[in-house]
Amino acid sequence: MNEEKFNQGLDVRRSVLGAEYVDKSIQNATDFNQEMQELVTEYCWGEIWTRPGLSKQTRSMLNLAMITALNRPHELKLHVRGAINNGLTKDDIKEVFLQCAIYCGVPAAIDSFRTAQEVFEEIEKEEKR
């Protein structure tokens, strides 16, 4: 493992997904999935998300579209929250899902709208506390 890239990735991962979620994922890693946590942090976040070629907002839009296409609601919830953290608006997210409806299929987009709405409601509840 490249410790420098891991640490850079950890910083970006925390800023996008939230420190609480990321720290919990790493602290709860087991012998079975520890290497996966390291791989994701070092390569996804440390190698790719730190590259200068795309903004965090663009990366978030791409992730929302790809995760919609893959129909991965758990990951979509994380990345909807991450997209908000990266400065995307609900309207930005809506436009991504409408684009996905055409190119990935209406059922996938409908599920993504539903999942995003759950995240928006969670965020609103958190803000009221």
Image (spheres, rainbow, N blue to C red):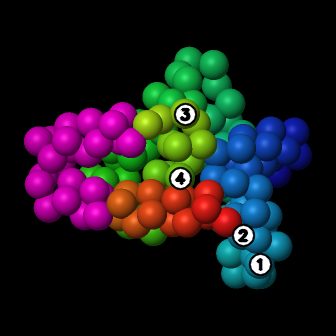
Q: Nearer the viewer, residue 39 or 68?
A: 68
Q: Are marks 3 and 1 in contact (CB under 8 Å)?
A: no
Viewed as shown, does residue 125 lie left or right of 6? left
Task: Give the spatial CA distance, label 3 vs label 1.
Answer: 29 Å
- Vertical position of residue 86 compared to residue 126: above or below: above
Task: Give the spatial CA distance, label 1 vs label 2.
Answer: 5 Å
Q: Nearer the viewer, mark 3 or mark 1?
A: 3
Numbered disc 4: secondary structure: helix
Task: Give the spatial CA distance, label 4 vs label 2.
Answer: 16 Å
Assess disc 1: are there few (<14), some (14-19) or many (≥20) residues with their C-alpha within 10 Å of its C-alpha: few
Residue, disc 4: 81
Residue, disc 1: 28
Numbered disc 3: secondary structure: loop
Q: Are marks 1 and 4 in contact (CB under 8 Å)?
A: no
Assess disc 4: are there few (<14), some (14-19) or many (≥20) residues with their C-alpha within 10 Å of its C-alpha: many
The percent position of residue 75, horizontal first and vertical second, equals: 47, 62
Image mark count: 4
Residue stretch in magenta: 90-114
Viewed as shown, does residue 22 lie left or right of 102? right
Q: Are marks 1 and 2 in contact (CB under 8 Å)?
A: yes
Numbered disc 1: secondary structure: loop
Residue, disc 3: 87
- Going by the numbered disc 3, the residue's amino acid type is Gly
Q: Are marks 3 and 2 in contact (CB under 8 Å)?
A: no
Residue depicted at x 29% and y 42%? 94
Task: Give the spatial CA distance, label 1 vs label 4.
Answer: 21 Å
Residue, disc 2: 25
Residue depicted at x 75% and y 76%? 29
**Residue furthest front as drawn:** 128
- Going by the numbered disc 4, the residue's amino acid type is Arg
Q: Nearer the viewer, mark 3 or mark 2?
A: 3
